Each structure stands twice: as C-alpha cells, then as structure tokens.
Image (cartoon, rainbow, N blue to C red):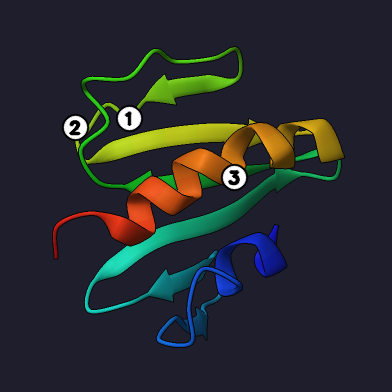
Amino acid sequence: MRQAILTQGDDITERVKVLYVAFSRMRTIATITLPNRNELFLNLIGDFDDIPKPDGVQDTKSGWGLRVTIRSDQDIRMAAPLINRAYEGKP
C-alpha cells in the first residue's frame, strides 16, 4: 500500500505518527491506520462524490473523503485509481 501511494510522484512525503502514517503533497492526500492484524484502512482525502463506491469503500462520516478497507492485494489494485485521484486532486 505504501508503494502504491509513494509511486504517484516524487513530491509525496511520508510522516509516521503513533496511530497512523500520513502521505502529503501540498496537503495530506492519504492516511493509513491499522485497526487490527488482518486489515488496514486507507483514508483518501479529496472529492469523490461523483464516482461509484466499490465494495470495501465508504464515504467518511466527516465528509472529507473515502475510507478503503484493505485486506488483500486485490484491494490494493482496486484502490489504485482512487489513490491517483486523491494525488491529482485540487490542493
């Protein structure tokens, strides 16, 4: 998951915090949290209102983006276009 985010561009920075890892460009575009050993949450920040939400993807309650539940490599592949959209989003 980390590589999928960092390969978006050379301008991505990574900050490791106690409870999450943040990835930023000019603003934070994604965070990763580990709620348990079997999955992680990829929180993508941006405007995703106009796209269909595949299984495992939900709008966040705060309204700032999407939460993608990652349990397998297939979920990472499914999240790749969403990661790109967060990266390309409006700063």
Mark 3 secondary-structure assignment:
helix
Residue 51 found in image quarter: top left
Residue where numbered disc 3 is placed: 80
> Could you give the CA–CA distance between mark 1 and mark 3, rounded to whole angstroms?
18 Å
- Horizontal relation, residue 56 to residue 75: left or right: left
Residue type highlighted by circle 1:
Thr
Q: Earlier in the sequence, mark 1 or mark 3?
A: 1
Circle 1 packing at 10 Å, graded few (<14), some (14-19), many (20+), is some
Circle 2 packing at 10 Å, graded few (<14), some (14-19), many (20+), is few
Instruction: Report the residue at 35% width, 51% height from top.
Output: 86
Q: Are marks 2 and 1 in contact (CB under 8 Å)?
A: yes
Mark 1 secondary-structure assignment:
loop
Q: Are marks 1 and 3 in contact (CB under 8 Å)?
A: no
Residue where numbered disc 2 is placed: 63
Which mark's residue is nearer the viewer, 3 or 2? 3
Q: Residue furthest left?
A: 91
Residue type highlighted by circle 2:
Gly
**Is residue 72 something that shows in the picture?**
no
**Is residue 76 something that shows in the picture?**
yes
Which dot marks residue 60? 1
Residue type highlighted by circle 3:
Ala
- Horizontal relation, residue 19 to residue 26: left or right: right
> Could you give the CA–CA distance between mark 2 and mark 1, rounded to whole angstroms?
5 Å
Q: How many marks?
A: 3
- Vertical position of residue 27 compared to residue 39: above or below: below
Quarter that holds the N terminus: bottom right
